[in-house]
Amino acid sequence: MVRPQSLIFTIYGAYSRSIGGWMSVGALLELLREIGVEDAAVRSALSRFKRRGVLLSENRYGLAGYALSPSARKAFDTGDARVLERRESPSSDRWVLVAFSIPEKSRDLRYRLRSRLSRVGFAQVTGGLWIAPEGLEADARLVIESLGVSQHVDLFRSEHVAFRSLPDAVGGWWDLDSIASEYTDFAASFAPLKHDYQSGVVSMTALQAFIDYTRVLTSWRPLPYRDPGLPAAHLPPEWAGIQGTEVFFYFYDSLSALAQEHVVDVCTSRNSGS
């Protein structure tokens, strides 16, 4: 079952920025009800986002609501290229390296840096040395700056020259079988819904587009971060990411605009008091 927190995160990331980054509590409750989430669960998740500084409590039009924090907006803006754009497999073996040394007294910060690097697709070469394809440099910078650890970190661009074969090294750094399995599960979950839309079993209304696209996007969001975007030469034959990507972009191309229309309609209606 998808957590309400994940659905709210998707709604703010996918729909709120084009309408100013703020949504009323009433609009959020209505939108989440349409997806089957109870009001109490939504309010609890909103409180957690507020405590974490992801959302800021703000009244507009005489209504209580929440706005994206500047850091959350920046993260979404950076993440769009990762989540909502078809990624071309890089043609060259260029890498970005993150080397860090954080004092033992700040080991919690060290843990958070490792965790965040892993979540954006970096792999550990050794203790304080992490690697990813060069295209993930912006993600590394965002992680380092958001944690305030730049004084402990050096960032390099590099290439592999010796001694293991690069495919062997890549296979040791990333768990490609696990990433492929996640793509396979995603495709298996949503390919039947894709078929239903294509065959006309499901009507493509704005409400239905919102419900289905929000669920698809929520399930999709972690995958482009788990997948570092390796050169095709280092991926297994018939890479599962290809099918998973095609399933997602069917929904993105077909439903995202209609889903946005529905969110705008709900927010406009709520803001006007009608």
Image (cartoon, grey):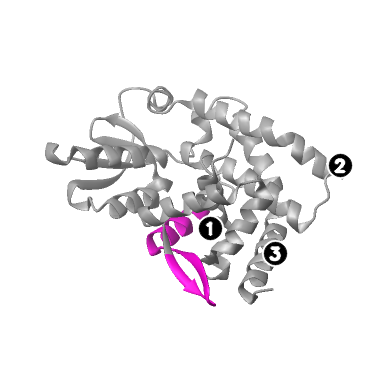
Looking at the rendered structure, the kind of residue marked 3 is Glu
The front one of 105 and 171 is 105
| Secondary structure of residue under mark 2 | helix
Q: Earlier in the sequence, mark 1 or mark 3?
A: 1
Magenta stretch: give its range.
Answer: 57-80
**Residue 64's x, y, as percent?**
50, 68
Q: Indicate which disc residue 261 carries.
A: 3
Could you tell me which residue is drawn at 81 percent across and 40 percent down?
196
Looking at the rendered structure, the kind of residue marked 1 is Tyr
Can residue 254 be seen here? The reply is no
Q: CA distance from mark 1 to mark 3?
A: 14 Å
Q: Where is mark 1, residue-wise?
A: 12
> In the rendered image, which quarter contains the N terminus?
top right
Could you tell me which residue is drawn at 76 percent across and 40 percent down?
194
Pointer 2 local density, CA inside 10 Å: few below 14, some 14–19, many at least 20? few
Could you tell me which residue is drawn at 80 percent across and 52 percent down?
204
Looking at the rendered structure, the kind of residue marked 2 is Ser
Q: Is residue 61 above or below residue 223?
A: below
Q: Where is mark 2, residue-wise?
A: 199
Q: Is residue 114 magenta?
A: no
